Image (spheres, rainbow, N blue to C red):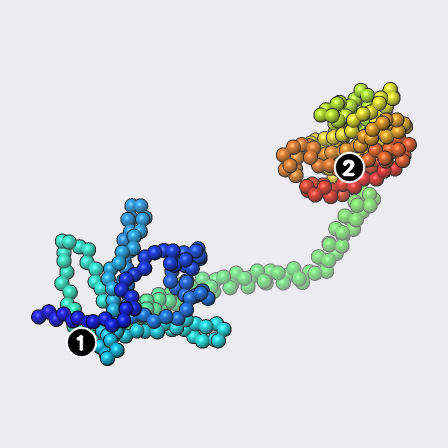
Amino acid sequence: MQIILQYIRTQLDGISIDFDINDYKPITSNNSIKSLSDFNSLNTSTSFDFNTILIYYTVEDISTGEKKNNLFGVLFLDKVTTSTDGSYIKRYKKYKPDTVLGLNGNSYGFKINIKFDVSNDNASVVSVVNEYSTFSMHMFTDALSKLQKSSDILLNQTYTVNKLNEEIENIKGLILNDHDKNEIKNRLSIIENQLSASNVIFENINDLTSLIEKNYQEILNIYNNKTSVNVAYNLDIIQPSSGISIDNSINNKLYIKNTMPSYNLSTKSVFDISSDFTLTNGYLTLEIELNEFNNYIKIKNENNFNIQNDIKIFIKDNLYKWKSGQSFKISFDYNFPLDLYTDTQQDLYIYTDFNDTINSGNPYSLEIAYINSDVFKHYDGHPIIEIICIDPIFTINNNNFIFDIL
């Protein structure tokens, strides 16, 4: 017999679901919200009442990974209660935690008895306990859970017993038999005989001491060249290097000499502004090689060349790298007219880092000195500029060099 219950609504409190996503702007506009639980943790959410649960299930295409959520059903949490004020479904209060007042929230858990069977060929028969025996079903479930725990404990104990059996068998193997006893006895006899032989040596300790003293005296005489034995030293392992020469022409003597003068001069160390410089992109440019140790060049203007361009000097450091404390001195000849005899003022720029170790995209991008044209006027047209490397690991901040004007 089918019973149909009808209820007359006297108050309209909601008959549809709002699917307009714009009405949920506090949720959709926040990318950090992935679920209603995330939204419930925000300050904009509040406590609420509810009496219905929507049950969804997710279908996934394993070939593409695409997922879709479908509504499975609607679960009303209680029956409709009729009163003089109208009919209603009992509501549950969901309290949100209040961090200001220190109040705790609450949560609910609901059991949904659903069985899925996706097999079309082997449909299974399910015996369902009626809704009036829920307490018995809970007791049966608890009994199964405890039985499973008992099974786990039994398996663990069985594993422990097996491990103990293995340990016992290993201990049995350590028990000495007669063969092992005889072997140990023979080894002890050998050690005893060796100790007895050693005692004979200690009884003649005076003879050993005399022999050691005699050998020591012989070695000392050889070292002091008081015997016919000559002592020679292997001097071939000492080799010359840059700025260092080795002189072993005299027997049993070795001289290490410093052959490096104050400056390491190149094959060309004097340059003329009118013949050795090149006009490039509006600048008078000169490229010179960096040598080991301290470097020196001199720049002259023998033909009284009228300088109308800024000067750039590039120190090429691809063969030899800069070292900490290494200096490069540039001396200008008298009456070098960067500011004395021209209508315009020209400046001097000095660059290095040929291999672009600072990753600027161009060679010679590290400016190590800038000399204003007024400096030449102050020093009567012949200043001496000494550039000193203080940090050979170049950085784009250009704090690797200092220079003095003499």
Return the x and y of residue 263 as percentages of the image width and height.
83, 33
Q: Is residue 198 left or right of residue 183?
A: right
The quadrant holding residue 171 is bottom left
- For the point 20% across and 71% down, the residue is 8
Return the x and y of residue 45 as percentages of the image width and height.
42, 66
Looking at the image, tell me whether mark 2 or mark 1 is earlier in sequence order.
Answer: 1
Query: Which residue, given by chain and number where applicable, does mark 1 sit on?
Result: 132
Q: Residue furthest left?
A: 1
Query: Which residue, given by chain and number where applicable, does mark 2 sit on?
Result: 369
How far apart marks 2 and 1 lie (CA) works out to 97 Å
Q: Is residue 35 left or right of residue 263?
A: left
Return the x and y of residue 256 as percentages of the image width and height.
81, 37
In this rendering, which labeled residue sits more in front, label 2 or label 1?
1
Under mark 2, the amino acid is Ala
Q: Residue furthest front?
A: 10
Q: Are marks 2 and 1 in contact (CB under 8 Å)?
A: no
Return the x and y of residue 54 as percentages of the image width and height.
28, 63
The quadrant holding residue 47 is bottom left
